[in-house]
Structures are given as structure tokens and as C-alpha cells.
Image: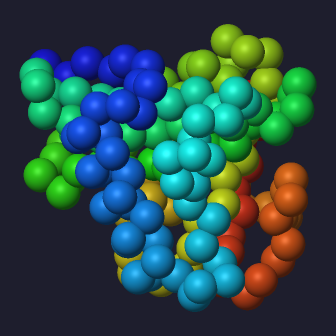
């Protein structure tokens, strides 16, 4: 059975999954459109990180950044390759949406890329009510990024 728990980014499995995530973003995105955070970026006090575990094995990771009192951003969503299409991303996304609602956020947003590597994530977000929209926060339109928003 899967379990979601807060993560302090010290577990070697968490670090390995984040390294895989960063490598994937660098492979699938133009250099000027990689906005994935490294360990130091995820340790910011405005970011909460959760990991999903299958017993002692990490299955996925996701984070919520507080942009202001009313808006949050999803960061670092990644499913371990051994757990693809097993509901990991859906469980983490629902957990993050619930956390945003618990924090009385009015809107939850995310930035992602274009192309085949991003299609499964886009499908998941849209299936949960996210819609395409404008750049937000510090993002500037760049021709590669897509911005999605969910009104809470």
C-alpha cells in the first residue's frame, strides 16, 4: 500500500529521484526553459515536499510552493520509472491540491513543457480540472513552457 509523507530531502532515494527529474527536464527542455528546482531550491521555507512510498521504496515526489497568500505552484512532480501508470502521480496531485485547499489558496498553478515527454503530465493535470492560462509568478512566456491553473 502506498503512503504519502512529508520529506526533508535527506533520504538517498529522494535525492536519486530528484536527480532523475532534473536530468529529464534538462534532456526534454531547452536550456533556457528548465525551471526544475534542485535540492537547495526545494529547501526554501515556502516549499513543502511530499514523497509517496511503496513500503521502503520511493514511488514519487511532488512539492507545493506558496507564491503568496492566495496562490500556490506545483513543483517537482515525478514518478519513479518502476511505478509509472500505477496511480502515483494522481495520488500526489490530489494530496497537493488538498494541501493547497487546506492553506486557503484560491488558485494552484504550474509550469510545464511541450512535447511527448510532457503529454502524460498534461493529461493528468487537465483531468483534474487544470486549464491553460497565462504565465504567473516570475515566469515569462518563452515559446516552450505551458502554464496551467486550477481555481480552488
Quadrant of the image occupied by residue 100 = top right
Residue furthest to the top in view is: 102
Which part of the image, by quadrant, shows the C terminus?
top right
Horizontal and vertical percent for residue 132? Answer: 72, 62
Is the image coloured rainbow, by chain, by secondary structure, or in one colour? rainbow
Horizontal and vertical percent for residue 123? Answer: 46, 59
Horizontal and vertical percent for residue 42? Answer: 57, 41
Left or right of 75 in this view: 116? left
Which part of the image, by quadrant, shows the N terminus?
top left
- For the question of whether residue 90 can be seen, the reply is no
Which of the pair 28/87 is nearer the observer? 28
Horizontal and vertical percent for residue 65? Answer: 68, 36
Quadrant of the image occupied by residue 91 = top left
Left or right of 105 in this view: 5? left
Q: Is residue 95 above or below residue 29?
A: above
Q: Is residue 26 above or below residue 11?
A: below
Left or right of 14 in this view: 125? right
- The residue at the point 38 percent across, 52 percent down is 18
- The residue at the point 18 percent across, 57 percent down is 81
- The residue at the point 73 percent across, 87 percent down is 143
- For the question of whether residue 55 can be seen, the reply is yes
- The residue at the point 41 percent across, 33 percent down is 9
Report the number of numbered marks: 0
Q: Is residue 11 above or below residue 101?
A: below
Left or right of 39 in this view: 92? left
Amino acid at each position: 500500500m502506498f503512503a504519502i509523507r512529508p520529506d526533508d530531502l535527506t533520504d538517498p532515494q529522494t535525492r536519486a529521484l530528484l536527480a532523475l527529474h532534473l536530468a529529464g527536464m534538462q534532456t526534454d527542455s531547452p536550456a533556457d526553459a528548465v525551471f526544475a528546482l534542485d535540492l537547495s531550491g526545494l529547501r526554501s521555507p515556502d516549499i513543502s515536499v511530499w514523497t509517496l512510498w511503496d513500503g521502503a521504496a520511493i514511488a514519487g515526489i511532488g512539492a507545493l510552493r506558496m507564491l503568496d497568500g492566495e496562490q500556490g505552484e506545483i513543483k517537482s512532480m515525478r514518478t519513479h520509472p518502476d511505478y509509472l501508470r500505477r496511480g502515483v502521480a494522481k495520488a500526489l496531485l490530489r494530496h497537493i491540491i488538498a494541501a493547497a485547499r487546506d492553506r486557503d489558496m484560491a488558485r494552484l498553478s504550474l509550469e510545464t513543457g511541450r512535447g511527448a515527454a510532457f503529454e502524460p503530465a498534461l493529461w493528468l493535470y487537465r483531468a483534474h480540472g487544470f486549464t491553460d492560462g497565462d504565465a504567473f509568478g516570475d515566469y515569462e512566456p518563452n515559446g516552450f513552457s505551458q502554464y496551467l491553473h486550477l481555481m480552488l
